[in-house]
Image (cartoon, rainbow, N blue to C red):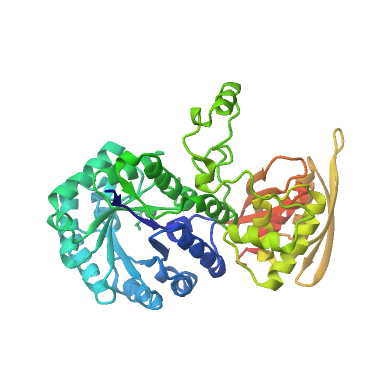
Amino acid sequence: MSDRLFIFDTTLRDGEQVPGCQLNTVEKIQVARQLEALGVDVIEAGFPVSSPGDFNSVIEISKAVTWPTICALTRAVQKDIDVAAEALQAAKHKRIHTGIGTSDSHIKYKFNSNREEIIERAVAAVKYAKRYVEDVEFYAEDAGRTDNEYLARVVDAVVKAGATVVNIPDTTGYCLPQEFGAKIKYLMEHVDGLSAGKAILSTHCHNDLGMATANTIAGIMNGARQAEVTINGIGERAGNTSLEEVAMILKCHKGIGIDTNINTQKIYPTSRLVSSLMNMPVQPNKAIVGRNAFAHSSGIHQDGVLKNVQTYEIIDPKDVGIDDNAIVLTARSGRAALKHRLHVLGVEMTQEKLDKVYEDFLKLADKKKDITDDDILVLAGADRNVNHHIKLEYLQVTSGVGVRSVASLGLNISGEHFEAAATGNGPVDAAIKAVKQIIKRQMTLKEFTIQAISKGSDDVGKVHMQVEYDGQMYYGFGANTDIIAASVEAYIDCINKFRK
Ligand code: KIV
Ligand code: ZN
């Protein structure tokens, strides 16, 4: 009989900490509902004390989602725990995730403390959280670099204090798989409460050296029964272990003998939804969900796949929800087909919003033959900019080989109309210089990424930008079949986010 692994999804907490990936509450609810449909066991919905936005999102997600446990993060601080408990009130199944750094460097430099005092603070936090909820998870931050003997003392103490799950994060992504597996094994063998079934161990691996998934699997094979993951592996710095990789490894390698509750056919739509809402492109060669994950390009591979698909394919793309035969939407598709596709992608909307998206869909279908899932997700999120006080009214660009590019544009700023024209070494340069003539601020474009969604020359281009202003970095996004317009939209999106 297979053992069961609990999937703890932290896309909305660790994933959302990534600069530029912030979601509003409505978008977070959309992701949480999709995670519920995907079958995750625990949703880490936020860090309530960190901001009113996070506090409110935890409240709303607690109301919107019923099957998974809703978890809120805290430090080992009473105030954090009070605020988390308040935010979780409406959750049907709730968990407080509290913890403290346990590595020598965290103890010395972060807390100016000592090992004994850290154990006392850990125990006090777990006991305090237990006043509010039965289900308390403790994290030993930087456990990856914490010596095993001391870590076992911490785990033993918090399990005795009532922790139901103990999270062993490789916070810096430092461990080797063998080392991380040995750490979990050591804890399983040296903490009585674990063998007695009073608590389970959880993995939480970061990907700084590209080993997050390998470490997670090593942890699972050595006794961990919860894995903390994010969709598309997003998260701090190089990211976290990705949900899709863990779920598919366990599905493909039945010999490991561990199952999850994940409905793998929902993996791809969930990946697209998160990528689109967070404006975070998925690298084309990303395992399981990247654009090229199932594309066979070399002649030898294509020949093999045509003879028998198993020669080069270990996963049937349909198993992760990629359906090449899915109905392609075109200008002749009706509202019902659009609504159905949105539903499959995890997006529900009011009739009024659907009408608006359908109108935009028809306009896009006029310019572009086949409308892809990514196009639809861009259209569904298009009203994200409605509250912007600066809007692009028109844009005209002339460019070519052997001539300097010229751009003229009009901006509507809080109802007032402004115009400017500029030249540049290319059309984007000219258009941005024209924007800068109107918005006279000291801002620097730091990053500029253009991504075509699918294949054709009629494709919708997505532009991601980072602009530095007043010592802060701002992230902007634009999508348009005209790549110059998408670039200007992304630039204006950044400016609209300036705090002053
Ligand atoms: O990486 C980490 O250590 C964390 C903890 C807060 C769980 O995210
Ligand atoms: Zn983390």
User: Residue 30 or 81: which is nearer the viewer?
Assistant: 30
Q: Quadrant of ligand 1?
A: bottom left
Where is residue 256? Give x, y as percent: 30, 41
Where is residue 476? Give x, y as percent: 64, 56
The reply to whether residue 470 is in sight is no
- Residue occupying image coordinates x 53% and y 42%: 317
Residue 304: quarter of image: top right
Compared to residue 135, the image places residue 169 above or below, namely: above
Where is residue 66? Give x, y as percent: 43, 71
Compared to residue 147, the image places residue 278 above or below, namely: below
Residue 8: quarter of image: bottom left
- Residue occupying image coordinates x 85% and y 37%: 400
Where is residue 419? Give x, y as percent: 84, 60
User: Residue 304 or 124: which is nearer the viewer?
Assistant: 304
- Residue occupying image coordinates x 56% and y 28%: 305
The count of marks equals 0
Q: Quadrant of the C terminus?
A: bottom right
User: Residue 465 or 254: which is nearer the viewer?
Assistant: 254
The reply to whether residue 456 is in sight is yes
Q: Is residue 91 left or right of residue 353?
A: left
- Residue occupying image coordinates x 69% and y 72%: 351
Q: Is residue 241 left or right of residue 105?
A: right
